[in-house]
Amino acid sequence: MLDKAQKITVTVVGFLLIGLIVMIFVIRMDPLGSTLPDKAEDYSSGWVDKDGTPADLFGIPDPPGTEVVYTNTLDGSKLGKESLCFVSRNILFSIYLNDKLIYDFHPTVGGYYGSNYGDYTHTVALPVFSDEETLRIEGTILFTNKWTGFEGMTLRDPGAYLTDAITQNAGKTIIFILVFGFGTIIFLFGLIESILQRDMLETISLGVIIMLLSLWTNGSARVFQIISGNSAILRVSDYTVMCLLPIPVLVFVASFTQNLKSKPVYIGIGLSILNFLAQLIGIPAGFVDYGGMLKVSHFLILIGVPVVAYLIIKAIRDKKIDRSQQAYLISALSVISFAGLADMVRYYAMRSNDASFVTRIGLVIFSGIFTVYEFKQMIFAHIKSRETEMMQRLAMYDTLTGINNRTAFTYFEKDLLSRQKGKCLFIHLDVNYLKKVNDTYGHAEGDRHIIAAARIISESFGEKGHCFRVGGDEFFVILDDKEYRKEYTRGVEKFRSLIEEYNKEEHPVPLAIAHGCAEYDCSAHNPEEAERLADSRMYENKKQLKAEKVSANEKS
């Protein structure tokens, strides 16, 4: 009862911690009595280019290398402590106020970063002035697409702007932390299980899939860019994920459907590796860029869909997966495939800044489905393991006496054969007059005779030795302790004492157990010879005990 209360308490604390993390990202402080209320003024309109034509700063169509100039007026008398806040993409630039440089953004790009730095959040402090001044942006286009330029330009308190940026992206960030953490746990669990016990390729690849997808869906979240200050590495992460994603997906489905040797799987993995190497070598050399390589990655993902479908259909046809597995696999992969295809359409056909919105939802569903599946599999594996352990125990133990049986003796004998050195003592024991007990008093009395013998042998030699019932009335003891001679002497004394004590009770036939021993040198690798010697000495003792009984009967 106490253990259950502790589990409940710890579980509640765990959920409270998760709740606290959520509140840190989501809940904002609104101090009462603030004399500086947060105000935001849109500043994305009113801009003109160098020809005096009205300009849209978001979605600049000019080709890479184009020099652009945009100007706008700014009334200092209406400003308090606001800064110019915005997100830039695919453009290097400087900002001037009446020809005076107030902000410069020319980060180092190239190398593995490619030709662009991704999305970057800016808060530009403005000098104090009272008149209407001219604000000018001079920029160089790095990459042309529908998102090149400046987004969400506002005049606002920089702290409030950054807080809002983090809060608005809190959902994405929380999903990333939880899902990536979950994927990491699955990956490490599968890896450890594979090292210690059994192959868990399916689980390992599932963990990698979840980690990759969580990284991709977090790409548009600005929290990590704001914290790290390096948007370029996040951009590299996004494109690398897309490049590598087909590999664990194909491995997972191939493992799940028992088609690991399928040629389409090898081809898909090979093409994905080539795509990755092309990025690894070609981008730093300047031959290609991530924007162009993304199309290759998308193409490989698209051709991977029919490969996955083929593997599933083949497994169903060959009856390699049951209906329950089919339901989990088809539903989970259908959800994530539909989500990925939907985001591709949104990326190419729509002006959507969040290119992973649908995939993010699909990832949560995908992870949920396979979480249920993996937990069911782990529970099933645990039950089967317990059943196997129980069956092995039953196979190694004598059901009547509870001590080791002939099978266990054979396994132990194999262990002795593998040893290169050391000595032990074999003791062969046999219950006298068992046939007489069975014939005269029945097998129930014979079983009691055997059970008593097993108990006495086990109590005498079992503390430092291994006891086996190797036949109907035959037992075998192996003393492999370093001081086996002393243990044998002590055991024989106790053995005789227990028999004498047992025979004081009223039994139809007194218990008599013959025994003989022989020393075995493990380096000889021939236990049969020592066993025969112990057996021979046991029969000599058996004759002696019978002779003593005859002599005792004659005297009485």
Image (cartoon, grey):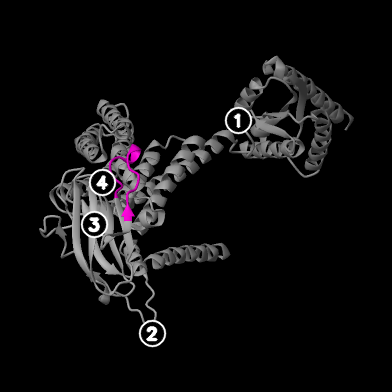
Does residue 362 appear in this view?
Answer: no
Give the residue pinned by disc 1: 408
Whole-percent x, y for residue 52 in the image: 11, 59
Question: Does the CB distance between marks 2 and 1 fall below 8 Å?
Answer: no
Sooner in the amino-acid sequence: mark 1 or mark 4: 4
Screen quadrant of the N terminus: bottom right
Q: Secondary structure at mark 3?
A: strand
- Kindly report the distance in space between the C-alpha atoms of the residues bearing marks 4 and 2: 58 Å
Q: Nearer the viewer, mark 3 or mark 2?
A: 3
- Kindly report the distance in space between the C-alpha atoms of the residues bearing marks 1 and 4: 43 Å
- Kindly report the distance in space between the C-alpha atoms of the residues bearing marks 3 and 2: 38 Å
Q: Is residue 53 above or below residue 302?
A: below
Give the residue pinned by disc 2: 33
Residue at position x 79%, y 22% from top? Answer: 543
Sooner in the amino-acid sequence: mark 3 or mark 4: 3
- Amino acid beneath label 3: Ile
Give the residue pinned by disc 3: 137
Whole-percent x, y for residue 329 in the image: 27, 43
Give the residue pinned by disc 4: 327
Crowding at dot 2, Cα within 10 Å, few <14 / some 14-19 / many 20+, comes out as: few
